[in-house]
Image (cartoon, helix red, strand yellow):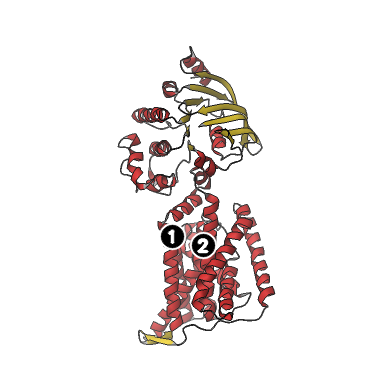
Amino acid sequence: MRFEAHGLRSGYGSVPVLHGVSFCVSEGEIVALVGRNGAGKTTLVKTMIGLLRATGGQLRLDGADITRVPPSRRVRAGMRAAFQERSLFSQLSVGDNLRLSGHTVAEHGRVLATFGESLAGREAQRAGTLSGGEQKMLAAASALASTAPILLMDEPTEGLQPSNVELLGDALAAARQEGRGVLLVEQHLALALRLADRFIVLEKGEIVDAGAAGETGLANRLSGRLAL
Amino acid sequence: MDALTLELLNGLSLFATLAIVALGLGIVFGLMGIINLAHGEFVMIGAYVAYVTHANGLSHWLSLPLAAVVLFVLGACIEVGLIRRIHRRPEVTILATFGLSICLRQAVELIFTKDFRGVPNPVPGATRAFGVLFPTYRYVLIGIAVVVVVVTLLAFTRSRFGLTVRAIVADRDLADASGVRTGIAYFCAFGIGAATAGIAGALVAPLGAIEPQAGLAYLPGAFLVVIVGGFNRLWGVIAGALVVAAVQTGVIHFYDAVWAQIAALALAVLMLQLRRVPVEGATA
């Protein structure tokens, strides 16, 4: 499966954020989307999944135009997103959140084991009472445990302790091994450099740089772009 | 002692009526946050379904599932044709459903005229229990209301469908992005809310006159029950109906029906103040 964006434009009301973004995510690859705060990364993810309406351009999933397709149909067509914020139903239990994401009760244990013991056996706990890091882990684990061929992970390492960042990296690498395509929005450059096959740099709603893993000087270029 | 028992049975009957009438509003207003001023008309149309069933020589008991089906279809059509386009704007929803209630009343008047209609009591007579005589049909009403309320509550709290509705109410965008068919779930939830109102209408039809304005009497009571019971939790309808019925029965016993209405209204205002919940309901 292949996801493509062609000249994508989007924004909030009359405020444009994305100004003609074009890229693709193919099966079996991790594409890292990096950029400073306010570059439009989350807007891009929300537009890809359909929570924001594209004001121009086209989105394609396996060749089919999904630009005007509602989010629920995009999910059923093979896309799954873990958002940076508001990624869980905080009033519902952990188990109910997993059920809503399409995981059967029998799968809950496996999903919650993605991050070792951190979430194990906590199906009955209300999701809103998990810590910020635990909520990120649950959202990421739920997306990773789905069968969606295209994953959109919006800053999944934010608030995670280093050991869990490592576990997440392993899970993302395993997803690639399974032939899934991942768009990884990431400020954690070390993880992106370790995992990604390709890089896209977003700045003020436009792609200003792109490169492939292994390119000479890529790390310095990305660091410079992010002004780290 | 007998007088007290009779008052308790009257209170229980009022509780059952309030609970089943308010149940649909608990779903539509309490859970979904849609202020539906046409809810009373759904009850009224349910009563007319009972009348038409009787007029065609069919059993009154058949009118209960018939009313559920008719009102489910009507409610679902209203959700798709009207509510879906405006539900995020409470002020527009109030105006639109107020207009809808007028349209429904006029439509019924065109079909059936303003004349009062009636349905004979399918279980006439009284039953002696707890030392007092009490209308048998009211016992039946209490039993059916309990079954309908419990089944509906279980459907919304224990089933996958109920989980879906609760998720949509909590965060519609996230539900959409989780692959939930939010449109279908809302369509069904609104339809079920209308269907329970239809059952309520058919159930209370033998107890009074059936006429196009009859629904107006049910709307304030249903809103009071939902407000007193609390938004966002359907079990609150039971608690709300219990408290409102107890207050009204008690005040009627010591004063009169006017003071009973005033007491119920004061209770609702007090509950709103205590909870500080805005009137637009669960989505606020």
Q: Chain of mark 1?
A: B
Q: Dot 1: what SS? A: helix
Q: Chain of mark 2?
A: B
Q: Which of the two discs, 1 and 2, labels the residue nearer the N terminus?
A: 1
Q: Position of residue A117 (x, y in %)?
A: 30, 37
Say which of A113 and B273 sits in front: A113
On screen, residue B41 above or below A141: below
Amino acid beneath label 2: Ile
Q: Which residue is mark 1?
A: B155
Measure the C-alpha gap from mark 1 to mark 2.
10 Å
On screen, residue A95 above or below B109: above
On screen, residue A163 above or below B91: above
Residues marked 1 and 2 touching at CB (< 8 Å): yes
Q: Position of residue A74 (x, y in %)?
A: 53, 40
Q: Which mark is residue B192?
A: 2
Say which of B192 and A207 sits in front: B192
Question: At x 54% / y 38%, what residue is drawn?
Answer: A49
Q: Position of residue B249 (x, y in %)?
A: 46, 77
